[in-house]
Image (tube, coloured by chain):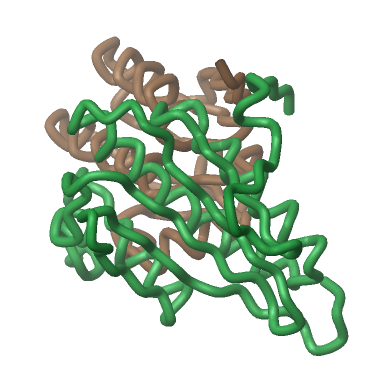
């Protein structure tokens, strides 16, 4: 698959007090960069020796959250990047996505919660339910600035390989 | 700008229009898939198989495209079936309950034999 990205999306930039086992990616709030976030996090997950099944789930979750984030930034006219932070450790990978501003509505992220009813369906996405189904430990909190942080973790396999 | 590849091709197999999709379907690439399917439906193809065997990734934006396509084709009393064995795509279909909404086949041959 051919991919090219500008330098600001390619580099894993450490911000401020980031720890040595932590990588941070800031993506412009544009749809074309959601794939970059997937690539970034899945590459780190492989380095952390998460199993392939978990990495597949991670790819979905990252895409869902970053899509919502990009839409929230764009909808609010926020040019600031969406921040994707991934911290690896013995237990696995902890991923945190920060969405600036107050436009990221948890309720709309969860809009259409629950599976599509048989015979009925909605064209709207079910991002939060998908992420919850894949990573039950997902947490969404608002910080003092009103930004939203979505966090979940990907375990490493007991024998360290996938 | 990041380039994410998605290839969408269509062909006729008997009474079916088959849409072969290759690559990753997400918020950036889904419009390309949607455009192709809409064109087919509006052009009179009301028996549609979307072949996802070449899809390495799909999230809910891609599912939304399929759901929208299903709604559109049902307005013409049409049928839309999927071919998919990719674990990741099947997982998203299952979590959202959409595996009960779309006929999902393991092979194109099975889909072609379907109603």
Q: Is residue B82 visible?
A: yes
In x, y percent, where is residue A120? 14, 57
Residue at 27% across / 53% down in the picture?
A147
Q: Residue furthest front?
A: A16
Q: Is residue B84 left or right of residue A129?
A: right
Residue at 55% across / 74% down in the picture?
A153
Colour green, chain: A
In x, y percent, where is residue A90? 76, 82
User: Between B17 and A105, which is closer to the camera in this rendering?
Assistant: A105
Q: Is residue B72 left or right of residue B33?
A: left
Residue at 82% across / 61% down in the picture?
A47
Colour brown, chain: B
User: Between A111 and B92, which is closer to the camera in this rendering?
Assistant: A111
Query: Which of the 4 quarters of the picture holds residue B108?
Result: top right
Residue at 39% across / 31% down in the picture?
A29
Q: Quadrant of the N terminus of chain B?
A: top right
User: Between B113 and B107, which is closer to the camera in this rendering?
Assistant: B107
In x, y percent, where is residue B90? 51, 60
């Amino acid at each position: 698959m051919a991919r090219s990205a500008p330098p600001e999306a390619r580099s894993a930039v450490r911000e401020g007090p980031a720890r040595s086992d932590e990588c941070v990616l800031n993506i412009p709030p544009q749809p074309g960069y959601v794939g970059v976030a997937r690539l970034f996090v899945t590459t780190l997950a492989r380095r952390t020796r998460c199993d392939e099944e978990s990495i597949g789930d991670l790819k979905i979750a990252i895409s869902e959250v970053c899509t919502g984030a990009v839409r929230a930034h764009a909808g609010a006219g926020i040019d600031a990047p969406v921040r994707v932070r991934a911290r690896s450790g013995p237990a696995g990978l902890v991923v945190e996505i920060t969405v600036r501003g107050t436009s990221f509505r948890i309720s709309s992220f969860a809009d259409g919660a629950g599976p599509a009813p048989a015979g009925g369906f909605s064209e709207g996405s079910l991002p939060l339910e998908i992420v919850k189904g894949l990573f039950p430990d997902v947490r969404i909190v608002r910080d003092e600035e009103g930004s939203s942080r979505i966090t979940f973790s990907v375990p490493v396999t007991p024998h360290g390989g996938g | 700008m990041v380039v994410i590849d998605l290839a969408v091709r269509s062909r006729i197999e008997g009474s079916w229009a088959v849409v072969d999709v290759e690559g990753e379907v997400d918020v950036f690439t889904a419009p390309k898939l949607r455009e192709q399917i809409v064109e087919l439906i509006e052009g009179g193809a009301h028996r549609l198989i979307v072949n996802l065997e070449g899809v390495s990734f799909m999230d809910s934006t891609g599912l939304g495209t399929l759901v929208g396509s299903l709604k559109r084709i049902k307005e013409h009393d049409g049928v839309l079936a999927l071919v998919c064995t990719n674990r990741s795509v099947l997982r998203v279909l299952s979590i959202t309950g959409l595996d009960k909404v779309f006929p999902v086949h393991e092979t194109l041959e099975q889909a072609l034999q379907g109603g």
